[in-house]
Amino acid sequence: MNNHLADRIHRIKPSPTLAISAKAQALKAAGHDVINLSVGEPDFDTPDFIKEAAIKSIRDGFTKYTAVDGTPGLKQAIINKFARDNQLSYEPQQIIASSGAKQSLYNLMQALLNKGDEVVIPAPYWVSYPDMVLLAEGIPVYIHTSIEQHYKISAEQLAAAITPQTKLVILNSPSNPSGMCYSPHELAQLAQVLLEHPKVKIVTDDIYEPILWSTIPFANIVNVCPELYERTVVINGISKAYSMTGWRLGYAAGDAKIINAMKDIQSQSTSNPCSITQVAAQAALEGDQSCIAMMRESYRERHDYVYQSLQEIYGVRCIPADGTFYSFPDCNQLIERLPTIHNDLELADFLLEKAKIAIVPGSAFGNNGCLRISYATSMAHLTNALFRFKQAVHSIL
């Protein structure tokens, strides 16, 4: 049967995050008390003022097609957000709204990449980056990092990874899965390398921008190096900041020719994002932003607890995150001590079967021997989960 499918299907793999979550749900359905720390989704409800804007749009009959790249009102709200929060200036033709930041990224890959073009991807990386590149017939080129370098690439590593075939470099800060954020100084060093390669484009995935508690102020590479403005596409969205994952609305800003090409791709796939979601997104961007600070403070408190608890498990190495709602402990020393476990896949499976905790193995993100722990859940669940983690590994040490 497989010979009837397109070759591109064989280039990609199912999402390991969703696979772990599905297995956890199956165990739950069978009556097991499973704590799911695998999915990167805020556990807060969408703020009421955003929901009310959506309800009003339905009652007002705003249920028809819109412009492919978003309503004028939403695009202006996005422009205003970039000016207010990031000191970046864009015109409407430089903005596209899509059905999630994932679609914006997918549109970009389809619009930019030709067969054989290389895309530099720092590891650990969000699981969808490589497969998006492969679906566009590009070649992922990984830069591997370690906990010792706080999971961030150096300028020297970036310079070594760029070849004449490099078309695009992906940056994600704060990072899923590591929770680490590049400082302006670190970005400036990377920018100096990129300035030496004027044909290389950059995409900065800023989806976790508002979930940052580090003393380092948020900046992306365009902030620290305005010379890269025309070569950089900035990706962001509403899902993480406003707890609106299911609403599906992301956006991109960049050179008008690139954005227009992304619009052409989108016009032949999904067309416009949901009209009602666009109204809700505009309300979110223009409304009271205090909801973000409330959620961020909760994530910070949970982070502190998870970090301290992981420190108490022998063989687990963990560093404090700068933001997001993930911890990314290095468990290689723990794996070496466990007689029946040989890698992070087996460790994640053991924790699910033995402790009934769903955690994604780090190899899914390009770093063997690590685990990604999402703390976008209640403190009660985290307390129980970390207790089970300790008990499970200590039982076989």
Image: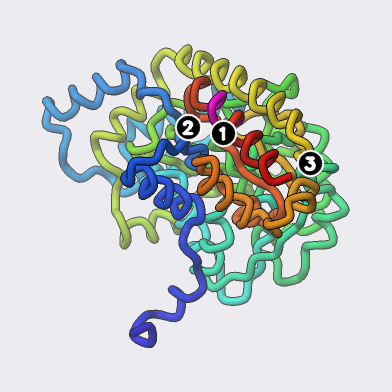
Q: Position of residue 89 (x, y in %)?
A: 56, 32
Circle 3 crowding by C-alpha within 10 Å: few under 14, some 14–19, many from 20: some
Q: Secondary structure at mark 1?
A: loop
Could you tell me how far apart the alpha carbons at marks 2 and 3 are, in whole angstroms? Answer: 32 Å
Circle 2 crowding by C-alpha within 10 Å: few under 14, some 14–19, many from 20: many
**CB within 8 Å, label 2 to label 1:** yes
Could you tell me how far apart the alpha carbons at marks 2 and 1 are, in whole angstroms? Answer: 7 Å
Mark earlier in primary sequence (2, 3): 2
Judge left or right: residue 360 versus residue 143: left
The quadrant in which residue 33 appears is top left
Judge left or right: residue 172 versus residue 143: left
Q: Is residue 335 above or below residue 247?
A: below
Q: Which residues are magenta?
A: 382-386
Rendered residue at 56%/24% (across/down): 383
Name which residue type carries label 1: Tyr
Q: Position of residue 207 (x, y in %)?
A: 54, 37
Asked if residue 383 is among those painted magenta in the image, a careful observer would answer yes
Which residue bears the numbered disc 3? Answer: 315
Which residue bears the numbered disc 2? Answer: 240
Q: Secondary structure at mark 2?
A: loop
Report the magenta stretch's main SS: helix
Name which residue type carries label 2: Lys
Circle 1 crowding by C-alpha within 10 Å: few under 14, some 14–19, many from 20: many
Mark earlier in primary sequence (3, 1): 1
Could you tell me how far apart the alpha carbons at marks 3 and 1 are, in whole angstroms? Answer: 29 Å
Asked if residue 268 is among those painted magenta in the image, a careful observer would answer no
Rendered residue at 44%/56% (across/down): 262
Q: Position of residue 133 (x, y in %)?
A: 56, 64
Q: Indicate the quadrant containing the C terminus: top left, top right, bottom left or bottom right.
A: top right
Identify the disc placed on residue 208: 1
**CB within 8 Å, label 3 to label 1:** no
Judge left or right: residue 186 versus residue 217: right
